[in-house]
Amino acid sequence: MAHTSTTLDVRTYVAELQRADEARLRARIEQAAADGDPAAVAEPAVLAGLVQTLWQGLSVRAELGADREELLEVVRLAVASIDPTRRDADRR
């Protein structure tokens, strides 16, 4: 695919949106850590990057036809990996 000024503008715009989303996530994680939330155990920038990556990956899997339960299983595993206290939490 040849890149035109339009595709580059869209790519730049999407990248800006993703950076803004990640900055908001990082700020929220920093606030959670300041509030003593035990789930905010990782470096905020790293945890925000992980959440952003999971979010994008789940979007791709959904577009490829993954059903809701499959996506929720991925989320449950991710949450349990980040916050071990959630490993035995009730399934919703």
Image (tube, rainbow, N blue to C red):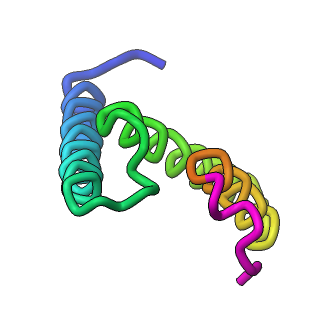
Q: Is residue 16 shown above or below 70?
A: above
Q: Can the viewer see residue 63?
A: no
Q: Can the viewer see residue 9?
A: yes
Question: Quadrant of the rendered structure where residue 36 is?
Answer: bottom left
In the current view of this chain or complex, which residue is farthest to the top? 2
Question: Quadrant of the rendered structure where residue 42 is?
Answer: top left
Front-lying residue, 14 or 83:
83
Main structural element of the magenta stretch: helix, strand or loop?
loop
Q: Is residue 56 left or right of residue 86?
A: left
Front-lying residue, 75 or 90:
90
Q: Is residue 84 left or right of residue 29?
A: right
- Residue 18, position as x, y percentages in the image: 29, 42
Q: Is residue 79 shown above or below 53?
A: below
Q: Is residue 27 left or right of residue 40?
A: left
Residue 86: say if magenta: yes
Q: Is residue 28 shown above or below 9?
A: below
Number of numbered discs on residues? 0
* Residue depicted at x 27% and y 21%: 4
The span picked out in magenta is 84-92
- Residue 53, position as x, y percentages in the image: 50, 39
- State which quarter of the image contains the C terminus: bottom right
* Residue depicted at x 39% and y 50%: 40
Residue 33: say if magenta: no
- Residue 82, position as x, y percentages in the image: 57, 47
Q: Is residue 16 left or right of residue 67?
A: left
* Residue depicted at x 20% and y 24%: 5
- Residue 33, position as x, y percentages in the image: 28, 52
Front-lying residue, 87 or 77:
87
Q: Is residue 22 shown above or below 92?
A: above
* Residue depicted at x 72% and y 67%: 72
